[in-house]
Amino acid sequence: MRPIRCIHVITRLILGGAQENTLLTVEGLDRLGGYRTTLVSGPAVGPEGELEARARRNGVDLLLMPELVREVSVRKDWAAYRALTDYFRREQPDIVHTHSSKAGILGRLAARRAGVPVILHTVHGPSFHPHESPLRNALYRRLERWASRDNARLICVADAMTDQYVAAGVAPRGKCITIYSGMEVAPFLRESDAGARVRREFGIPEDAMVIGKVARLFDLKGHDDLLTAFAGLAGRFPQARLLFVGDGLLRGALDARAQSLGLRERITFAGLVPPERVPEMIRAMDLLVHASLREGLARVLPQALLSGCPAVSYDVDGAREVIRHGETGWLVPARDVGRLGAAMAEALADLPRARRLALRGCELFADQFRAETMVRRIAEVYREELSKAPLREGRGPLR
């Protein structure tokens, strides 16, 4: 009997939801036993931070492939495809499981070329979306259809991802399965005074009403919309403060916008923090706002509810699968800054009620978003698909 040989492929191991999901999956499979896993990633470059050190620290078999880059490059993409194909042929894995758009397309095509028995892809967020050009969307849809042609299964982090892939003709509904993105929930559930320590660390008054956002400072993350909404309610709530957790290319532009609004002294840029500090950053907040315009299902939404922190979110992608308007938080139409501000004001005006909504969300979703739940369900899919796949010639039975 031999272990299941499983290779995961992702474009880069930066700090991000898809990357944390992938790393937790690989770590969980290693703990589960019966698997020999490798994580293949392109280099983590940029201001977003990286998870490579954690992967190595936790004993993950990590292979960095310099040819695999996020930017479109015919030369590098061809080189990455060749490198992945050669690697799969040498390793002869039972399963190749891909993540993110670039690695998802190149990895699946390479796995098919190498004759891998089971090929899966997790949809963390579609490569095609309303904020992309029609030409690029048409190209991405075609590439996704091509790459998905021989897939065993598409694992979607939200039902909304399935709906979008089916509507785009990428895959039939029966080929998709929703497995919510898992996380280490215990730090969010644990009672602590870490929030007070965070406020002291960043000079935020103890009696401030802290509105927080956890996201990279990049396009489509909605920081500018949040600044505009905050400007509209700042006079009504003089104790309100903004706390931005994350870093990125828009740091300077957002700082300048805050200055132009006359609100710079009421805004704290915490910068990049390691994932293990996210629970305490949320503990420092009275209200979390998720104003991103594109997201599979933002992990910060269940994280906020697990922490007992009320949440307001734009109604995009899978957000409504966690934020049920009036039951677990506030859901407002995307780009409707007026209603975003009104929802924030409603929450701040009655924080006890807002916290009750968050606690209702915690009751509903604590088990659903456990990393252990995600890994168990993924392992079930693996077993199901392997049972239908032919054994590689010369390979013994699986454990």
Image (cartoon, rainbow, N blue to C red):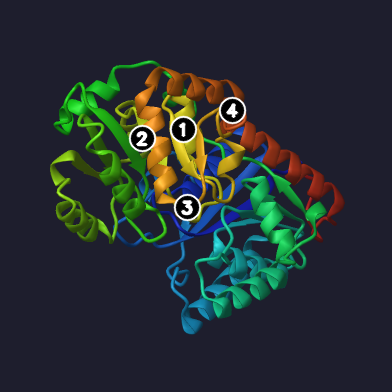
Given contact means CB atoms under 8 Å apart, are the residues at marks 1 and 2 in contact? yes
Q: Residue at x 29, y 39 (%)?
A: 233
Of badges 3 and 4, nearer the viewer stands 4
User: Horizontal and vertical percent for residue 384?
Assistant: 81, 44
Disc 3 on helix, strand or loop? strand
Disc 1 on helix, strand or loop? helix
Given contact means CB atoms under 8 Å apart, are the residues at marks 3 and 4 in contact? no
Spatial distance from mark 1 to mark 3, Cα to Cα?
27 Å
Which residue is under mark 3? 62
| Snapshot quadrant of residue 34 | top right
Look at label 3 and name its amino acid.
Leu
Mark number, residue 278:
2
- Label 4 vs 2, first from the N-terminus: 2
Residue 186 visible, this angle: yes
Query: In the rendered view of the protein, which quadrant contains the C terminus?
Result: top right
Q: Residues within 10 Å of mark 2 (few under 14, many from 20)?
A: some
- Label 1 vs 2, first from the N-terminus: 2
Q: Is residue 134 above or below residue 89?
A: below
Disc 4 on helix, strand or loop? helix
User: Horizontal and vertical percent for residue 176?
Assistant: 74, 52
Look at label 4 and name its amino acid.
Phe
Which residue is under mark 4? 365
Q: Residues within 10 Å of mark 4 (few under 14, many from 20)?
A: some
| Snapshot quadrant of residue 280 | top left
Mark number, residue 189:
none
Given contact means CB atoms under 8 Å apart, are the residues at marks 1 and 3 in contact? no
User: Horizontal and vertical percent for residue 342?
Assistant: 40, 39
Q: Residue at x 49, y 27 (%)?
A: 185
- Label 1 vs 3, first from the N-terminus: 3
